[in-house]
Image: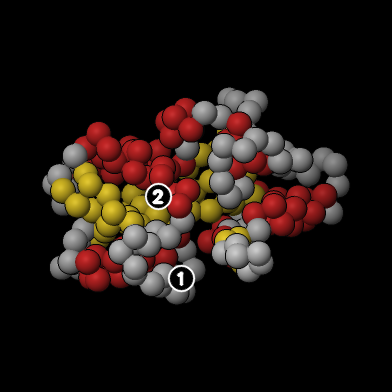
């Protein structure tokens, strides 16, 4: 039986500002007071899992234990059909960390270019279908945890378009749309994204 989440503080087990913003917006209607692991100064645990679920659980349990509060972790990524599901769980790793001019982040343009380069090697008729996958792990300090998975199907485009998203958003066009995730108003994206799909399942089970 799914454990219910009551109103109050919840740790968002992420140091990714874009993810934290999206999760915060999705949680606001439910009386939840989100605080991020980054704001609490928690270190980022090493993501040693080989699946989205393993990494999400690893992060959620680490924050729940450190804070003594329920914690919600997201592990998500891009699966490209023509690349055998890559980059998948290694989506962020394809965007190498950059340390220049005071910047501390990942080079997502480089990562998008790597995906496009691999597709281009397969010729102009390559299958450009892809999906974003999001697995949410909700963990409590006593070790109990719940998992919820969401997906968003679409296709990849090139060159990147839009400045409203993050990560691979500028090259992903969701099914039924002509705009990339990065061109869609954030409120609309929240309603159709892989994260929104996972959250709908979380809300149905945990509230």
Residue 22 in view? yes
Q: In terms of image quadrants, where is residue 26?
A: top left
Q: Is residue 149 left or right of residue 171?
A: left
Q: Is residue 131 above or below residue 115?
A: above
Q: Are marks 1 and 2 in contact (CB under 8 Å)?
A: no
Q: Position of residue 76 (x, y in %)?
A: 48, 53
Q: Position of residue 171 (x, y in %)?
A: 67, 41
In terms of depth relative to the viewer, which is nearer, 84 or 184? Answer: 184
Please give the name of the residue rendered at 51% of the width and 39% of the height, measured from the top-left corner: 152
Q: In terms of image quadrants, where is residue 127?
A: top right
Q: Is residue 142 left or right of residue 66?
A: left
Nearest to viewer (mark 1 / mark 2): 2
Q: Is residue 4 above or below residue 90?
A: above
Please give the name of the residue rendered at 61% of the width and 47% of the height, measured from the top-left corner: 168
Q: In terms of image quadrants, where is residue 111?
A: bottom right
For mark 2, does the 10 Å Cα neighbourhood hold few (<14), some (14 to 19), or many (20 or more) residues? many
Query: Residue beneath label 1, please?
Result: 47
Query: Residue beneath label 2, please?
Result: 20
Q: What element carries label 1?
A: loop
Q: Residue furthest front?
A: 101
Please give the name of the residue rendered at 39% of the width and 59% of the height, measured from the top-left corner: 14
Q: In this view, does 20 lie to the left or right of 158?
A: left
In terms of depth relative to the viewer, which is nearer, 180 or 198? Answer: 180
Residue 115 in view? no
Q: Where is residue 136 in the image (x, y as percent from the top left)?
A: 36, 52
Between the C-alphas of marks 1 and 2, the distance is 18 Å
Q: What element carries label 2?
A: helix
Please give the name of the residue rendered at 19% of the width and 52% of the height, measured from the top-left corner: 9
The C terminus - image quarter: top left
Give the mark nearest the N terminus, 1 or 2.
2
């Amino acid at each position: 039986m799914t454990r219910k989440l009551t109103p109050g503080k919840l740790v968002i087990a992420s140091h990714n500002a874009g993810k934290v913003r999206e999760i915060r917006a999705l949680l606001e209607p439910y009386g939840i007071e989100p605080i991020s692991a980054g704001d609490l100064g928690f270190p980022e645990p090493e993501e040693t899992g080989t699946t989205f679920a393993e990494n999400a659980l690893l992060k959620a349990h680490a924050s729940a234990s450190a804070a003594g509060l329920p914690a919600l972790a997201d592990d998500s990524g891009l699966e490209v059909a023509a690349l055998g599901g890559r980059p998948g769980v290694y989506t962020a790793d394809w965007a190498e960390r950059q340390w220049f001019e005071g910047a501390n982040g990942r080079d997502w343009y480089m990562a998008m270019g790597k995906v496009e380069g691999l597709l281009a090697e397969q010729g102009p008729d390559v299958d450009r279908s892809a999906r974003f996958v999001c697995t949410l792990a909700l963990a409590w300090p006593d070790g109990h945890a719940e998992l919820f998975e969401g997906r968003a199907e679409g296709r990849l485009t090139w060159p990147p378009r839009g400045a409203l998203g993050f990560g691979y958003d500028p090259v992903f066009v969701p099914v039924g749309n002509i705009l990339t995730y990065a061109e869609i108003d954030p409120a609309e994206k929240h309603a159709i994204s892989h994260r929104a799909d996972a959250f709908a399942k979380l809300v149905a089970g945990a509230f």
